Image: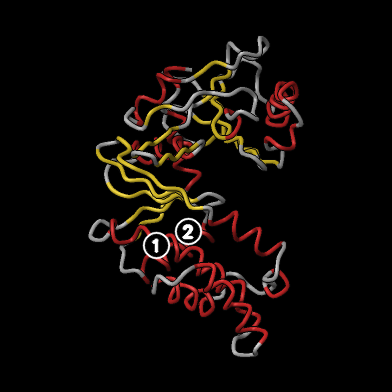
């Protein structure tokens, strides 16, 4: 089918839009800080959507696929999670039309996934679209890692989610750096390689995270550690905690990371530290590939 489609990754704080053709090529893109929190209420999503089309100079008939927190209880409308047993390549058949009459004919929301393992429950919104793009690019089996505010480790088997776990890595780093006893010393470069390795080494010893985090402060105030490395050490501890928890299961398989260049580089360094092979996938290409899969259903 020879038509284009607009995909919008509508998160909590930011929004990214891509006009994509049937082959997954990006024809135009737009990003802003008009995430869910900035919209200011459910009744304002329609006007905000119109603003995207105006900014991108797009016609009013282009079909739109919305993913991310736009489908949460605080978003445009709440869309129920799919069970993790639903194959990712069936996502296009589970799109939900926006119930706003002005947009229902053209805007569809991608549902997230819910994984249950006994009493343990985990959920995702937005990452499922990137996973669809990954399997469309041939990554149907193995571990996919999606770093960010809430990092996901997802195990796929033939395009079906077998399990996934969420780590509040990015959110914890932001909280620690903005408030609390560590914030005053976390002013250095969080990508400092030596400081990052210090954090990874401590995480690899499976020591309690709350204790190792405090020891960052203790090292600085006792003048036993360089203050300019504190931010990187905290980053290494938090990312290392993910790998300490998940790396054993991924041993012998390796991981594929979908993330921004800077963040993916840290995860690749952590993977090497924990003895895992790591392939980095470009998040923009993965997302555009995913959006092209929805063209027949839009």
Depicted 138 relative to depicted 169: above or below: above
Q: Nearer the viewer, residue 169 or 34?
A: 169
Q: Nearer the viewer, mark 1 or mark 2?
A: 1
* Residue 205 occupies quadrant: bottom left
Q: Can you tell which mark lies on residue 243?
A: 1
Q: Residue furthest left?
A: 252
Residue beneath the point at 58% across and 11% down: 105
* Residue 99 occupies quadrant: top right
Q: Nearer the viewer, residue 175 or 1?
A: 175
Depicted 42 relative to depicted 188: above or below: above
Q: Earlier in the sequence, mark 1 or mark 2?
A: 1
Q: Badge 1: how crowded within 10 Å, few (<14), some, or many (20+)?
A: many
Residue 127 location, x and y as percent?
A: 47, 40
Pick the quarter of the image with the N terminus.
top left
Q: Badge 2: how crowded within 10 Å, few (<14), some, or many (20+)?
A: many
Depicted 297 relative to depicted 125: above or below: above
Residue beneath the point at 45% across and 66% down: 240
Whole-number angstrom distance, CA of label 1 to CA of label 2: 14 Å
Q: Are marks 1 and 2 in contact (CB under 8 Å)?
A: no
Residue beneath the point at 74% across and 27% down: 41
The residue that disc 2 covers is 264
Residue 294 location, x and y as percent?
A: 44, 24
Q: Residue furthest bottom?
A: 223
Residue 14 location, x and y as percent?
A: 66, 42
Residue 10 location, x and y as percent?
A: 61, 35
Instruction: Left or right? Give the position of 179 relative to 135.
Output: right
Label 2: which secondary element: helix
* Residue 246 occupies quadrant: bottom left
Label 1: which secondary element: helix
Instruction: Left or right? Give the position of 1 relative to 79.
Output: left
Q: How many marks?
A: 2
């Amino acid at each position: 089918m020879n038509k284009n489609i607009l995909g919008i990754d509508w998160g909590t704080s930011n929004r990214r839009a891509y006009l994509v053709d049937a082959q997954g090529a990006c024809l135009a893109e737009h990003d802003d800080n008009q995430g869910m929190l900035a919209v200011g209420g459910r009744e304002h999503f329609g006007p905000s959507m119109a603003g995207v089309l105006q900014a991108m100079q797009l016609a009013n008939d282009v079909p739109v696929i919305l993913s991310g927190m736009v489908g949460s209880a605080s978003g445009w409308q709440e869309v129920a999670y799919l069970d993790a047993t639903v194959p990712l390549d069936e996502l296009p058949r589970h799109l939900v039309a926006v119930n706003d009459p002005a947009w229902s004919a053209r805007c569809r929301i991608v549902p997230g996934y819910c994984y249950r393992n006994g009493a343990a429950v985990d959920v995702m919104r937005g990452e499922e679209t990137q996973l669809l793009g990954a399997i469309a690019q041939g990554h149907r089996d193995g571990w996919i890692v999606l770093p960010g505010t809430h990092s996901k480790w997802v195990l796929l088997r033939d395009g079906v989610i077998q399990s996934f776990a969420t780590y509040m890595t990015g959110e914890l780093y932001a909280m620690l750096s903005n408030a609390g006893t560590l914030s005053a010393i976390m002013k250095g470069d969080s990508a400092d390689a030596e400081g990052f390795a210090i954090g990874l080494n401590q995480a690899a010893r499976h020591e309690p995270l709350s204790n190792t985090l405090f020891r960052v402060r203790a090292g600085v105030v006792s003048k036993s550690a360089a203050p300019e490395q504190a931010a990187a050490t905290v980053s290494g501890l938090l990312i290392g905690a993910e790998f300490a928890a998940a790396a054993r299961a991924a041993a012998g398989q390796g991981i594929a990371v979908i993330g921004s260049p800077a963040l993916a580089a840290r995860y690749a360094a952590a993977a090497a530290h924990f003895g895992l092979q790591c392939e980095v996938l470009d998040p923009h290409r993965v997302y555009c590939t995913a959006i092209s899969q929805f063209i027949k259903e839009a």
